[in-house]
Amino acid sequence: MKFVHIFGPQAVGKMTVGQELTKITDMKLFHNHMTIDLVNHFFDYSTKEGKRLVNLFRQEIFEEVSKSNLYGMIFTYVWMFDMESDWDYVKQLSQLFESRGGTVYYVELEADLEARLERNKTPNRLEHKPKKRDIEWSENDLKRTMEKHRLNSFEGEIKFQNYIKINNTNLSAEDVAKIVKESFHL
């Protein structure tokens, strides 16, 4: 089992890179909005009920996938590096897959704000993330989150084996997926 954890700020291209990676590997994509948008029909993700349900669905999916015969899974996540709870979550998730013989690969994406604001409006993003269709709200949320939290790691901060950081400001999702595949021999 291979578990590719793609993380970075909103609209950096995590889901799109994941989609491209599924085309060139036998991996399945689980982008974070698959659970957020499901639960959002009942509870906003910002509520304690919403967060609990999202985490519950994700955990159950991770449990089943980690013990399955699937080749691998790609998961996307906005990691807030200034929050210890996010560090704990990433470690817990990694330990789950590793405890069952899986290998975890970490892909950090970063891009400048201009590129992210453009990507925030792409048809692919809006098709797969209904909550982002309110562009004004989405852009404000992107900026607020960036001001409130640190969404990319400092140089040398991540010590995990199988880690790569890619500035994809001027790279296509296809190119990034190829870099990931080649870097980790997926």
Image (cartoon, grey):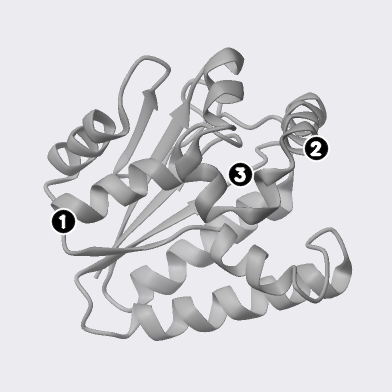
Measured from the top left, where is residue 31 in percent x and y?
48, 58
Helix, strand or loop at label 3? It is loop
Kindly identify which residue carries mark 3. 79
Q: CA distance from mark 1 to mark 3?
A: 24 Å
> Viewer-nearest of labels 3 and 2?
2
Q: Which mark is residue 25?
A: 1
Tag 3: amino acid: Trp
Q: Residues within 10 Å of mark 3 (few under 14, many from 20)?
A: many
Helix, strand or loop at label 2? It is helix
Tag 2: amino acid: Trp
Taking 5 as reference, is 48 left or right? right
Mark 2 in CB contact with mark 1 (< 8 angstroms): no
Q: CA distance from mark 2 to mark 1?
A: 35 Å
- Say which residue appears at 13% left-offset and 38% top-offset: 182
- The front one of 28 and 62 is 28
- The front one of 23 and 69 is 23
Give whichever of discs 1 and 3 has the lower sequence position.
1
> Viewer-nearest of labels 2 and 1?
2
Q: On screen, 7 above or below 151?
A: below
Helix, strand or loop at label 1? It is loop
Q: Quadrant of residue 42?
A: bottom right
Mark 3 in CB contact with mark 2 (< 8 angstroms): no
Quarter the N terminus occupies: bottom left
Q: On screen, 121 above or below 30?
A: above
Taking 160 as reference, is 153 left or right? right
Give whichever of discs 2 and 1 has the lower sequence position.
1
Q: Quadrant of residue 174?
A: top left
Q: Residues within 10 Å of mark 1 (few under 14, many from 20)?
A: some
Mark 1 in CB contact with mark 3 (< 8 angstroms): no
- Say which residue appears at 45% left-offset and 44% top-offset: 124
Kindly identify which residue carries mark 2. 137
